[in-house]
Amino acid sequence: MSKSPAKIIMNRISLIATVAILWANMCVAEPLKVVMPPFEKTIEIHLVYFYKVLELALHKTEVTDGPFELSTSSEFTSVDRCFADLKSGKNINVMWTVTNQKRESEFLPIRVSLLRELNNFRIFLIRNGDQARFDNINTIDDLRKFSAGLGSQWPDTDVMRFNELNVITSPSYLPLFKMLTAKRFDYFPRGLYEIWNEENVHKDEGIIIEKNIMLYYPAPFYFFVNKDNAALASRIERGLKIAIADGSFDELLLSIPGFRRAHEEQKNVHRKLFILEAPSKNQ
């Protein structure tokens, strides 16, 4: 039995009133303040993406969860310091990074892979003039004769060492480029999405991209929040899933030139692909 015109009109009035109340609440509600780490200038082009995708997720939930203000902290610090700030609730309340068991035990991960599969592949920055040395690498045992440079707290370091690859570390990111040129190690493994811009930034230092080798291991990139901030974690997760469902997530991802190039490089059949094992959660 169909509804009467009067009931239809009342239902519409009720819906309009509900939307009006939600909108009014949003207008008077204190905006949610979300603070991320600042960008490292040398790779600012792709790091802008993490700011934008978080903004997208928060925007997708604005009607249900209210307004927000997104900003970055004033001074760049190391990854360790960022995690310390996140744990203490000072300076930042969201950060993005590769996941590992320790991070997931200490913080709340939002388990939506921010880079899809792009972060699972690594190619190398090397010194200009060293390509011939890498041309003779045909097996993982050959690669073990060389040394890699990585951050001391990066999950990648654990993966490389688990696979018995030699690693030299630095507590922060930027010194690794100078360490490479100073021959402290032989190669700097980088994600497909970041290496092209890094080569451009550091080309005057004699750093180039190695042509033949690609590493693969699962390394999903997540947002993390403080363990006591379940509401923020829930909002970000819901927003990301809405963006994935409506296509705006992938549209944003592929709007970044480095990500588009990385997507193509994944299909480069001329590279030798070495698949590494990741440490299990019990190791």
Image: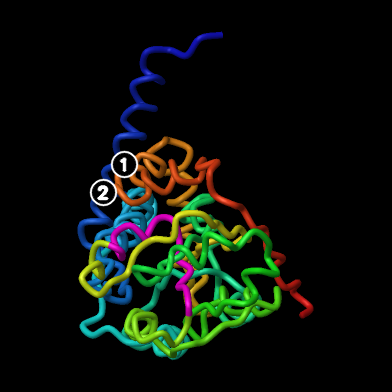
| Of the pair 4 and 59, the residue shown nearer to us | 59
Q: Which residue appears at 48% of the width and 77% of the height? A: 186
- Tell me the number on the disc at residue 19: 1
Residue 194 is a magenta residue: yes
Callout 2: SS: helix
The answer to which image quadrant residue 252 occupies is top left
Q: Which residue appears at 32% of the width and 73% of the height? A: 36
Q: CA distance from mark 2 to mark 1?
A: 6 Å
Q: Is residue 277 above or below residue 184?
A: above
Q: Which of the image's four quarters has the C terminus?
A: bottom right
Callout 1: SS: helix
Q: Is residue 27 above or below residue 102?
A: above
Q: Which residue appears at 39% of the width and 61% of the height? A: 209
Q: At which x and y percent is residue 76? A: 27, 83
Q: At which x and y percent is residue 33? A: 29, 71
Residue 172 is a magenta residue: no
Circle 2 packing at 10 Å, graded few (<14), some (14-19), many (20+), is: some
Q: At which x and y percent is residue 130? A: 42, 69
Q: What residue did someone put label 2 on?
A: 23
Give the residue type at disc 2: Trp
User: Looking at the image, do the residues carrying marks 2 and 1 touch, with CB atoms under 8 Å apart?
Assistant: yes
The answer to which image quadrant residue 247 occupies is top left
Q: Which residues are magenta?
A: 186-199
Q: Which residue appears at 30% of the width and 35% of the height? A: 16
Q: Is residue 107 above or below residue 255?
A: below
The answer to which image quadrant residue 1 occupies is top right
| Of the pair 276 and 41, the residue shown nearer to us | 276
Circle 1 packing at 10 Å, graded few (<14), some (14-19), many (20+), is: few
Give the residue type at disc 1: Val
